[in-house]
Amino acid sequence: MFSSLLLSGFLIAVQPSTLGQRAEVDSILLDPSLLIPGRSKCNILNDINPFMPLSCHNTTVQKNLCCFNAPGGHFLQTQFWDYKSPVAFAGPNNSWTIHGLWPDHCDGTFDQFCAPDREVQNITQILQLHGEGEILDYMHTFWKDNTGNDESFWEHEFNKHATCISTLEPECIQNFNNRNDVVIFIKRVISLFQILPTFEFLKRKGIVPSSTQTYNFTDIMNTLKQATGKTPTINCNGRNKQFLNELWYHFETKGSVIDGIFTHADADSDSGCADTVFYWPKGLPTPTPITTSSAPTPTSTEDKGMIQVFTSAGANVGCILSKGTWSQQTCATFRPVAGSVPRSIKFTSSKGPCAVDATNGTLSCGSDITLASDFTNSTTSSGSLLAYNGSSSFSSDVVPTGIVQSPVFIGDVHSQTSLHYLKYRSQD
Ligand SMILES: *[C@@H]1O[C@H](CO)[C@@H](O)[C@H](O)[C@H]1NC(C)=O
Ligand SMILES: *[C@@H]1O[C@H](CO)[C@@H](O)[C@H](O)[C@H]1NC(C)=O
Ligand SMILES: *[C@@H]1O[C@H](CO)[C@@H](O)[C@H](O)[C@H]1NC(C)=O
Ligand SMILES: *[C@@H]1O[C@H](CO)[C@@H](O)[C@H](O)[C@H]1NC(C)=O
Ligand SMILES: *[C@@H]1O[C@H](CO)[C@@H](O)[C@H](O)[C@H]1NC(C)=O
Ligand SMILES: *[C@@H]1O[C@H](CO)[C@@H](O)[C@H](O)[C@H]1NC(C)=O
Ligand SMILES: *[C@@H]1O[C@H](CO)[C@@H](O)[C@H](O)[C@H]1NC(C)=O
């Protein structure tokens, strides 16, 4: 038996602890293969300086974003339990696998693909150039793409998320060379993953994969909460969201992701699982009702994502924000659930359920909305095209620029701008 912890040496004592006790994770790593090949330009003492704010908790504007993570100050170390993938792509049957490390804004929204010029297409070569064969082997075991294309999955994670980490920008690295920012990111992800051995956390409480036994979701949540002292986001897929499959652990930081401190934080989004769940063994066929459910929920595998705005020519021109307005600057996070009629979908943002206002036809999301509107969706290559009341066009009075947000109207009533389309895209 091996576990993610033992494979590359022991880094940090990970003991299950009672709530709140283990607030901070020391990021100084002892295992030589995980030593970070670079330093920040920050005074390391900043990290223990009581006046150095925790990301997302600053009360004044922080000017040096090389030493303070912003706007992405809330980090998610995301993991998969890939029970449905072919065994060869699912990772060890006694370990969860790495998805990535995502910088969310402090309100659950997030940026993505922040620096096209820093995107990479050769992570394997970069690791080899840096003599990181051991890390590469580790990644082929624990950072698995469920279709077998590990390299492109790693590239996707770096290009989409790591480019949005302010403290990882090349100018923030003291000895930036040969794309060591990529190696630094990868080692930081792995070192966080290693202090979060989900399989072990659950096993200690007798929660192990089984095709016959189901578990009380509250027990799973409490077990994982105890492990870090903070609430994670646990997501399930399959029929009625009954199958554990993804887990997000949350952090905030002091200083740089390169050599600063990661502190466990509470989830910025809700979990999505049934009250009773399966922790299905990897490689075992799932029971037929799961794969051939007679009434599939349209959103069974998609738990969180964004609603993007497209022109009729297919250009992506921003996203819908949490209140339901349109912005070209940033994207909010939406959680889709099955709508009240078959093949329909409803959304909730951090502000609340989303609905089309009956009097003026605008889209809005808020806690005062009691009934979310049903949208129908049809799958396209770049996401799910949304339609309301039979129409997939949306319009606005003005195209938003900069920090401007525009209300979105259903249909073509406000066609000062050309018609636009909305697509839901999962965060995976
Ligand atoms: C925290 O710092 C960020 C980055 O400088 C800034 O955008 C944000 O407004 C600051 N928050 C507060 C409450 O000052
Ligand atoms: C993993 O697979 C091995 C070899 O097939 C098997 O002996 C072991 O019981 C499995 N472990 C789990 C947790 O399913
Ligand atoms: C990776 O690709 C970039 C861009 O094509 C290239 O400049 C760099 O030399 C490559 N690095 C390695 C190690 O192959
Ligand atoms: C799960 O456990 C909690 C707390 O022990 C209990 O309140 C709840 O009823 C249980 N749920 C199910 C579905 O058994
Ligand atoms: C959209 O509908 C298709 C079926 O038409 C479904 O397979 C897909 O999961 C749906 N997507 C979302 C985000 O609901
Ligand atoms: C539409 O109506 C809602 C509710 O009455 C209101 O909150 C919203 O501001 C209106 N939007 C526009 C663009 O008039
Ligand atoms: C749906 O569209 C029809 C016209 O096609 C319109 O009469 C009706 O009021 C619309 N319903 C809603 C809820 O917007």
Image: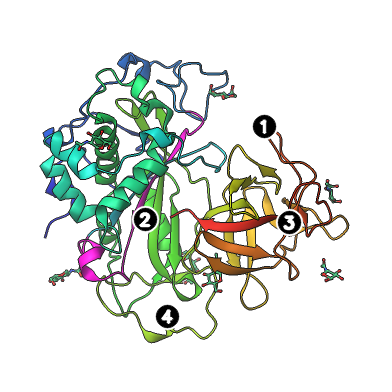
Question: Mark 4 or 3 closer to N-term?
Answer: 4
Amino acid on which the number 4 mark rests in the picture: Ile
The furthest residue to the front: 313
Amino acid on which the number 3 mark rests in the picture: Phe
**Residues at marks 2 and 4, CA–CA distance in whole angstroms:** 26 Å
Residue 403's mark?
A: 1
Q: Nearer the viewer, mark 2 or mark 1?
A: 1
Question: Mark 1 or 4 closer to N-term?
Answer: 4
**Residues at marks 1 and 4, CA–CA distance in whole angstroms:** 44 Å
Query: Who's the residue at 80% across and 51% down the image?
Result: 415
- Mark 2 sits on what residue? 223
**Residues at marks 2 and 1, CA–CA distance in whole angstroms:** 42 Å
Question: Mark 2 or 1 closer to N-term?
Answer: 2
Q: Find residue 65 and report its horizontal and vertical position in percent.
A: 45, 21
Amino acid on which the number 1 mark rests in the picture: Ile
Task: Provide the secondary structure element on which disc 3 rests.
Answer: strand
- Mark 4 sits on what residue? 290
Q: Disc 2, disc 3: CB below 8 Å? A: no
Q: Nearer the viewer, mark 2 or mark 4?
A: 4
**Residues at marks 4 and 3, CA–CA distance in whole angstroms:** 35 Å
Query: Who's the residue at 58% across and 49% down the image?
Result: 315
Magenta span of residues: 70-94
Q: Nearer the viewer, mark 2 or mark 3?
A: 3
Q: Nearer the viewer, residue 306 or 314?
A: 314
Q: Please say whether residue 92 is one of the residues in the magenta stretch.
A: yes
Residue 411, placed above or below residue 401:
below
Q: Nearer the viewer, mark 4 or mark 3?
A: 3
Residue 374, placed above or below residue 171:
below
